[in-house]
Structure formats: structure tokens, C-alpha cells
Amino acid sequence: MSDKKYLFKRNNVWWVKLAVPLSLRSELGYDLRRTTGEKDLDKALPIRDKIVEEFKTEFQIRKVNADDKGIVLRGTEHMQKTDISDPQYFHKVVDCQYACPAHTNVPEYIRLIAQKKYDDAYMLNWESNVFPGILGRTCDRPCEPACRRGRTHDKPVAICRLKRVTYDYKNDIDPYLPEIPKVKNGKKIGLIGAGPASLTVARDLLPLGYEVTIFEKDNKPGGLMRTNIPSFRLPAEVLDEEVYRIIKMGAELKTNSYIDSLKNVIDSFDAVFVGTGAPKGKDLEIPGRKEASENIHIGIDWLTSIAFEHTKSIGKKVIVIGGGNTAMDCCRTAIRLGADDVKVTVRSPKSDMKASDWELEEAIDEGIPILDNTSPKEFLLDDEGKLKGMKFEKMEAQYTDGRRKLIPTGEEIIIECDDVLLAIGQDNAFPWIEKNIGIDFNEWDCPIVDKTTMQSSHPKVFFGGDAAWGPENIIWAVAHGHQAAISIDNFCSEVDLFDRPPPLTNLVSQKMGIHEWSYDNGISQEARLEVPHADLKQALNDLKMEVELGFDEKLALDEAQRCLNCDMQTVFQEKLCIECDACVDICPTDCITFTTNDTEEKVREKLRVPALNLDQDLYVSGKLATGRVMIKDEDMCVHCGLCAERCPTGAWDIQKNNYIEAHNLNKGRVKAKEVA
Amino acid sequence: MSYFKPINKHPNLEKNKLGLTRRDYEGGVSTLCAGCGHDSISACIIEACFRLNIEAYKVAKLSGIGCSSKAPAYFLNASHGFNSVHGRMPSIATGANCANEDLLYLGVSGDGDSASIGIGQFIHAIRRQVNMVYFVENNGTYGLTKGQFSATNDLESKNKYGEDNLFPPIDLTSMAIQMGASYVARSFSGDRDQLVPLIMGAIQHKGFALLDIISPCVTFNNHDSSTKSYDYIRNHNEAMGKTDFVPLGEEIKTNYDDGSSVEVKLHDGSRLSLEKTDHNFDPTDAGNSLELIREKNKEGKIITGLLYVDNKCKPLTEIMDLPDKPLNTLEQDELCPGSEVLDEINKGLS
């Protein structure tokens, strides 16, 4: 047996692939890959042994806070029959849902849009991601790069903008909201910060009878969604509707209540959730910083003061330093406040910028130049001591072994400016948490938080959102909120925090009759549709005018038709198969192969089209009458269902995989069923 | 029910020398029953044409009547086609062959079309050595008329409704060898590893090539008392050694020990390499082939593989000494020798 079977090559380096056992998959995903960092097979092999040993030991002493646990080596033996009773198998096939931190059932709501059932589509979103209207405008959309359509066609489905459609076209959804018990369960929960994480916790706990109090330092709830996202991207009425919907469910909101001591709060509650975000913008300590401080602003603070209308103007020439989404919001806001010369400078090459592609595009479309490879050196002052410009040095990116290094070129440039906005990152800050109350902090002054339970070292205190592990985005805060709410409910009911509810799953045949399936496989082959934009001239003069207009109904329905319905799973039963090859012949993307079983590495090579995308699994059947097995590469399947349509014996069936990630709303649902 | 296949294909799909993928050789979505063996055969024809870098516009698909004869609609969309009267496809093929021998002729027929109504035509096309590939998609039943016995159904088999077959079958392969077919093979629609090289060999062969392909009818002849069901064929198939098709100028990749393979050179220089088995079989000896088929029939086995090949035969157009250029391209001055020649002839007669 060749040792190579344990390894695969990517980016010219050997990797180890470790399969995660069933019990840990919900936590760790389907498998783990670790690079050996070696190009040479002989050198990689001993490193591989070490990695395997490390994983084996780590598994045995399974610590609570470890995020890297892997165990069995895949690839030493013939491929095992795929266990489709494991809900994670088909969940992973639904690329968008799997990539979403909150695991929103995307194909299902897109189908509901296609049926013009906007209320249902909105509620499906609301249950899972709590803020469909807000996220439909601002989400970082991890689902879209994952979208299968990006592999099989050209560009992903505009999932995020379809989510917005559910908000824009819904009617009154109040009747569908969960009922809030009049008799409370006697447990009081304190939530610090009224951002997306806390609001999610509140929404998940209120229907279970908890009494929830939210403390907010500003005069309105919403957290960074209100303070840092400009209203030309997220109109206040959308924000207010979705935020106050939760408050109206019965949360007690205390605005203008800055908590300056956790100790004072902790005893009044049965559990406390900290969702205070990462509120400290990073500063830039270079010559001239102090002297020119009047015209240098920290981006997120500046955006906040605009949101609350404390700041209403800015100089004519503005430099924004930073390459993330905050930098994009800053430069676009500056233009709307009356600046006529706004430039963004970023140290790295444009291709490495942290800003989402679409936010960068919007800034460029508004005529804002992005100067990359430009590193700030000094703030320059005029004779009166006022900021007059900045000195930068041009950098050059060099890549060695996939690692980037920025090398100064010595070339200096000077850019004139009246104001500078710093958007170079954010930090957590907890000056209000006493060091002696049992919450442990790590070397970077971040609390030590368990990745599964969101619990800190103080059993009553839970963290989530940016407050837990630093800046992420709204959808991650929501996902954290769901998990924290489960933990808090377990904690208050004296259930082990690791005894977590499983996802609700269902796999149901969609067969309606001969050659009939209950979904529309006539997908649109059109390119991704563009979202209409407001007139640029008008938009640039109005801070509150929403730039993106959203899809109109026709565009929405057309875009919805681009979805491949990846939740419609192809389920295979080997005992019914007569090996007529009809499915192999009809499959438009050559996913299906009948062949002899072998190790995964060899199987991947001998398929009709070799399966080179190791991120995607192979669906392996049990042994067939001829001794062969059916192997389907999930990578390129377009879920057209033709394999099932051309199957004479029903060995292939199309079954809808409904996967609802665990959150507390499910609990109410399960209880209601039990009562019924 | 879907009538179209999504147009998108796997981005890593292999391309042949013409830059085409397998999917460029497809036809419409089949309207035959799901699981029909004929669809597998269509897929194998697609695969063979793809691998041989055939330009689809240089192919003519000919057929008669029956389920099998619908099949040409499901492969090679860009080819010529002619759907003839029941059993009369061989005549059309003969005429077309004389008119334009530059095209590749793929005749697709079934057991009814070839062994019953068209048997006279079939025999004479063989006798005349028409340069074509003649597919018999043999399912032993009249599927299009609800499952009556066909002339190739075995004596011991019953139909779907339990009635006995009273008459012995016609063995098309032995008949073809006796009539002078120069390439005769039998295969099974469910064994594409065997079938694809046989089709490739047949396409490169010059002369009449018969492929008798057992192709189960899932609707009427795939039951327990059928001798042409998927299960029965898999259990009784006696495949001869593996046949590899080796295109001109390529090395044989399969490794057989010395002397364990037989090579047959085809007209264009490409080769068929046959793995030798216990049969001690020489595929170029007609007597040997007939003996083997008869023996295996007696044992109740279905022998599959390349049964007979005569790589020195002359095709119809050479026998008739037709001009090198296709007849349909000849101009007036080439067809009419002129009055001087006529005068010469007349003089000779006087």
C-alpha cells in the first residue's frame, strides 16, 4: 500500500485529510484538513504521522474549548457506504445553507419567493436569522461564494438580495410570531448591549417565558447595525421594524444605560449575556497624530456620531485609511456629507483587501479612488498646526510560499487633506468587567469563551457577537445568539450545557407520480441579475437615500428561478438498482459512475470526470449485484432530478432535505407537538 | 416530465482532438422507457464517436421502425438521418452508400426490423458487403406493440403474461457470418466496457459490420422467465477476452503476457487487440467462430465479444468498382463521356 493514499496535494503542498466521527460532526464539520507544509512527499510523511497522533490524543482528552479535533484517517481502506441518516451529509450538499453561520434554509425560501409566498419566506428567514430585512441589505453573505451555481454556471444566485425581497414584499407577519407566555418561568436574564447578538438571545428566550432586560448605552437599540451602517445602505425604518419587533415581544429595554460594572449587574439576574461588540476602533500612532488630532477621526466613532446626527459636516478633502467594509462606509458617507475629494488608502494590494467585493465595487462606482500598496507614514501640518496632508510610502507585495510580505519601496507620496478617517480595525474592550469576579481573560484581553456553549469561565456569564472573539459580522452575531440562548436555557433548567438539542431534520420523497416531482427543475440559465440602483447624482447628495433599490417583483421571480434547489437530494437505494446505466447516461454533469470500490483517492481519479474538488463529498452506495458500487460526485450535481426520472425501478428518488438548525424556537415547536 | 437536459456540463469534461466533449455528440432526451437498454447503446455510440474524433456532419443515421429505430434521435444531433419504412433500412443504406461512400453509415435496427419483416433486406445488405455499422438492438420482444415474441426470442422463455414461446430463435450472428459479414460481434447493453471498443472497431472497419447487442426491454421482457433480462444476461454472459481498440499511431496500453493476445489490423491501420482466453479462438476463422457460437448456444450461454472479423474483405463500392469520388459529387463532364466517345462506341457496333 502506498503511503500517498493518506495525503492529497493542494497548492503544491501535501495535506492530510481527517474524517470526523459522527458524534462530533455538528461541532467540527465533516472533515478536517491539515497542511503538512511540505512539498516533498518524503518530508510530508513523518509530519503526517505526527498530525494524526496529535489528533488522536486530542480526541481522547477532549477539552471543552478545543476547536481542532480530528480522528480517523480517511483513505486507508475502501470507501464506506455513505451514511445518509447523518443529517450533516445532505446538509453539506446544500452549500449555501451549510456555509451560513445560522444555517438558514436558503433553497426553501427561494422556492417560497418563486411561489410569491413572501410572508412564509420572510418567517422562514426570521426564525433562522432574526433580521431578514437588515441582513438582506447588509449581510456579508458567506452563502454566495459557497453557492453551487458559482461552480456549475457562472455567478452565484443573488441570495442576499432575495432575502431582502422577502422583507420588501411581505404583508403583516405579526400573527405568525410566537406566542409569549403570560405566566413567566421566574428566570431573569440580563443582556448587555442591544446589538444583533443580544436581540437574538432575547428573541429566543422570550417565547420560553424568560424575563429579559436589555441594557443599551445609546438612546436607541440596534448596536452597530444602527451606529456603524450608514442609512444609505440600511434605512432606519427597516432597522427599527426588525429591532422593535423583538422589543415588543416583551423585552425590557433600558436605553442610555451604560453598564460600568458587571459585578453590580450580575447578582440581579439568573444569567447575563454580554453582547457589547468590539467598540474600540484602532488608532494609528505615527508622527503628527497628536498634533493633528482635531482632524483625525476613528471611523466607527465618526459613523456613530453621524448616525446620531452629532456630526453633520466634514472637510472638502478626505483620506480614509483602511481596506475593510468600515473604510468603504466611511468614504461613501464622507462624499455624502459634502467632501468632494475622497480617497481610500490601503497598505495591501487591492486583491487582498478585506472589504467584501460588492462594497468595494459600490465605492468605486461612486467615483472613489482606492490607492493600494500605500502605507501611511506621517500626518503633515501647516504653519498654524492644522492638518494639511499625509505622507505615504508605496509598498510592494511579495509572495513566498503563499505568504505575503509587504516590502517598502522607498517611494514616498504626499496627499493633501482636510480630514482623515481611520478604519484600520476594531478591538474588544471590557474596562467595565472587574478582573476579580471569575471571568478569565486571555493575553489579548479577550474573555475566554467556549466555542460551543458561549459560556465564559463564570458560569452565569455568556458572550456572543463581536464581544466574544472580535469583529465578525451580523450573521455570526445571530448564530452566537442562538447558541447562547440554548446554553442559557439549559443553564437555567439545570441541564448540562453540552446536552444540546439536535437540528430538526426531515428527508421526504417528492415523488408525485410517474416522472413527476414536486419541484420545478426547469432552472433559469440566465446570468445573475443586477439589482437596480438609485440615480447616483441624487444618492450622493442625500445621506439617507438608499442606494440599492432591491429587486422588483419580476426580477425577483426571475432570479429565484436561478436557484438549483440543492436541498432536493438524490437518494439511492442499491437494492432496487438493476444497473441499466440510464442515470449515468442522462446526468448532464457526469456526476454518476458505477465502478469497483477502492480507496477514496483512487475512486476520485477513476470517475467519469475525476472528482478534483476535495471540499465536496462522494456519495457511495453499498455493493450492487455486479459487485460494483454507485459513486456520485456531489460537486457538480445540478439537482435536476433526471437520474430519478430515467430510473426504471425507483432506485433513485428525489427527497427534500429539510434541515432546521437547533434554536430555542424549535423547542416550543417540539413541545407543542408533544401536547398535541 | 422533463424534455430537456440542462445545458450546463461539467467544466472538467474531457475534450477530444476536435475540441468537443462527449455532450456535443448527444441527441434529444430519450422518450423510450426509463431504463431501456437502447439508451445505453446510444450512450456507447456517443462515447465511441467522441473517442474516434468523428465529425458528426459526416455521419448518416439510418433506421426502420420500432423502439430501436427511434434511437437515432437520441444521439449525434448534428448528423444526417433517414427513418425508412419497416425493415427497409438496408436498401436505403445500400443506395446511400453507393451515392456517397464518404459518409459513415450507422444503421440502427431491432430484432423485429431485421429478423422478421426486414430479414430479406438484411441478408442482402450483408451479401453485398455494404460499408456500414449495422446495430441490432436485440430485446427479443415487440416492445412497441405491447410485448409479443420476436424472432430472436429463445425457445425456453415466456412472455410477460406467462405464455410460452413456441418457435426457435434466429441467431443473427451465425447467420451474418454465413452470409459473409466481415465484422461480427455480440455484446450486452449493460457492459459498456466491452461494447464501446467493439463499436469503435466496427466504425473503423471497412465492410459490413454487425453488432448484435442484447438490450433488455425493461417494460415487457425484463421478468424472471425472460432470457433477455438484465439479470439473465449477467448470469449467462460468457464474455470473451477483453477487446481493446487501439487507434492508429497509439501504443497498446493494456499489458498482456506475451502471446496472450491476438491483434487484428483494421483497414485504416488502427488495431483491435483481443485478450486470449481458454477458447483458443481465432476471430479471423469463420468456421471456428460458427462452431463456438453453436457450442455456447447449446450450453445455454450467451457468448459476447468480437466473434468474427475479415480485415481483407472488399466493401460494396470496391466490388462494383465505383469511382473514388462519391457519385453525388460527379459533374456533368465526368458523368457524360461526350459525343466523341459515343461515336467510337457506335463505330465499334457497326
Image (spheres, coloured by chain):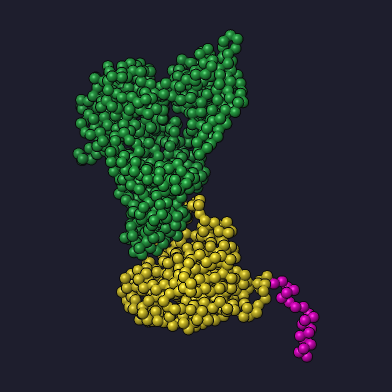
Chain colours: A green, B yellow
The residue sitting at 54% across, 81% down in the picture is B127
Vertical order, A654 against A554 (above or below) = below
Residue A675 spot, x, y in % from top left: 20, 39
Vertical order, A102 against A625 (above or below) = above
Question: Which segment did they paint magenta?
Answer: B330-350
The residue sitting at 36% across, 55% down in the picture is A78
Residue A618 spot, x, y in % from top left: 39, 51
Is B168 situated left or right of B125 in this image? left
Extreme residue in the bottom direction: B350
Is A367 situated left or right of B219 in this image? right
Residue B31 spot, x, y in % from top left: 45, 62
The residue sitting at 27% across, 25% down in the picture is A458
The residue sitting at 52% across, 73% down in the picture is B263
For the C terminus of chain A, the image quarter is: top left
Would residue A674 be counted in the magenta stretch? no
Q: For residue A60, what is the image quadrant?
A: top left
Residue A103, visible in the rendered structure? yes
Q: For residue B58, what is the image quadrant?
A: bottom right
Would residue B336 be counted in the magenta stretch? yes
Count of picture labels: 0
